[in-house]
Amino acid sequence: MQQWLPYLHILIRNKTAYLKPVLLFLSTIIFHLPSVSQNALVPIGYWREHLNYQSAQQVVKGDKIYCATTNNVFSVDADNNAERYSKVNGLNDFGVSAIAWDDATQQLVIAYTNSNIDVLKNGTVKNISDVKRSTVTGNKTINSIYCSGGFAYLCSGLGVIVINLTKYEVKDTWLIGNNGNQIGINGLVNDGSFWYAATDEGLKKVNINAANLSNYINWLNVSGSNSLSNGSVRNIIVLNSKIFALKNDSLLALNGANWNLFYNDANWQITSVTASENKLLVCQKSAANIGRVLQINSSGIIEKTLVNATYISLPKQAIADAGNVWIADA
């Protein structure tokens, strides 16, 4: 795999004030794969992939750094050895909608656009096709995944689908829309006391010890009060037990019972916000399609602004890891 590692753009620290960490980009990295000649003969019974690993969408830290593209997944380990994952070497589908890492079981959860689920651990893949095969009507698209304590919480177009990552089966489904209706879930977290769900109806919360989390009556819609306006919430993030909500292009922080503006820039659209290494990583693009990534501490201080017209065009997600910033760029 090291043969194509030079195609991973590595921008080393320079004198420009904008670029302070080593910046490793996950975009446009495997358009040409030199490892296999295009004219080489493929033995009978074997497959050769011609897959596009461009258009990176998401990056997460697990036992390796994992990146999801619009089609498949690849990883980079601590020694910069890269590995690709596709139907050729064990995955059960293509077209990735979301990935997440579960620390408790040390597994990567991969959700596909058709709602099929793969769980990857040490090169072994377990498939969970229950959601894909379900005859339940509605939007089963998986928007994001939150992993905690051996469970994967799939934020879907109809509600939250809970996957047991030990038994590899669906454990529960939370339909938390008004009157128990299906509702799009954009993000989910818990801070040890409450579950928070960013939904198309607003921000909802429930005590983690509630007797029946699948009962919509237990979920309180907190939008429309305490300076959090009504309407869809794009995502919900927890950093150092502090809750942040992404609404439109404003990042709000929960202080006590009130929501205060934490970050906003009218000239920049927020693509995503993630929390890692006690930092918030904010991916943005301007009206002129210039991309940048901000690293913000929990006090709201912008510690780093990463801008480079050559390599950052449309950052979709970023994480911090050991002083580096990994950016999945479309």
Image (tube, grey):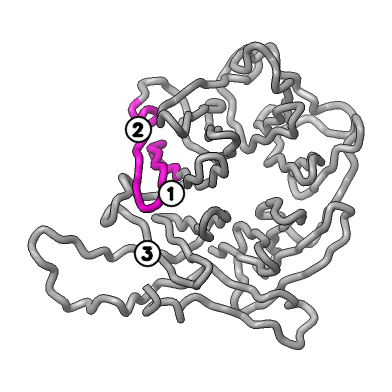
Residue type of the residue flagged with mark 2? Ser
Segment colored magenta: 110-133
Which residue: 57% across, 19% down? 175
The reply to whether dot 3 and dot 1 touch (C-beta < 8 Å) is no
Residue type of the residue flagged with mark 3? Asn
Mark 1 or 2, closer to the camera = 2
Which residue, given by chain and number where applicable, does mark 2 sit on?
129
**SS class of the residue under badge 3?**
loop
263 horizontally vs 249: left or right? right
In the rendered image, the quadrant that contains the N terminus is bottom left
Distance from the alpha carbon under mark 3 to that under mark 1: 12 Å
Residue type of the residue flagged with mark 1? Val
Mark 3 or 2, closer to the camera = 2
Where residue 120 sits: x, y (%)?
41, 47
Which residue, given by chain and number where applicable, does mark 3 sit on?
52
Q: Which of disc 1 and disc 3 is earlier in sequence?
A: 3
Which residue, given by chain and number where applicable, does mark 1 sit on?
96
Distance from the alpha carbon under mark 3 to that under mark 2: 24 Å
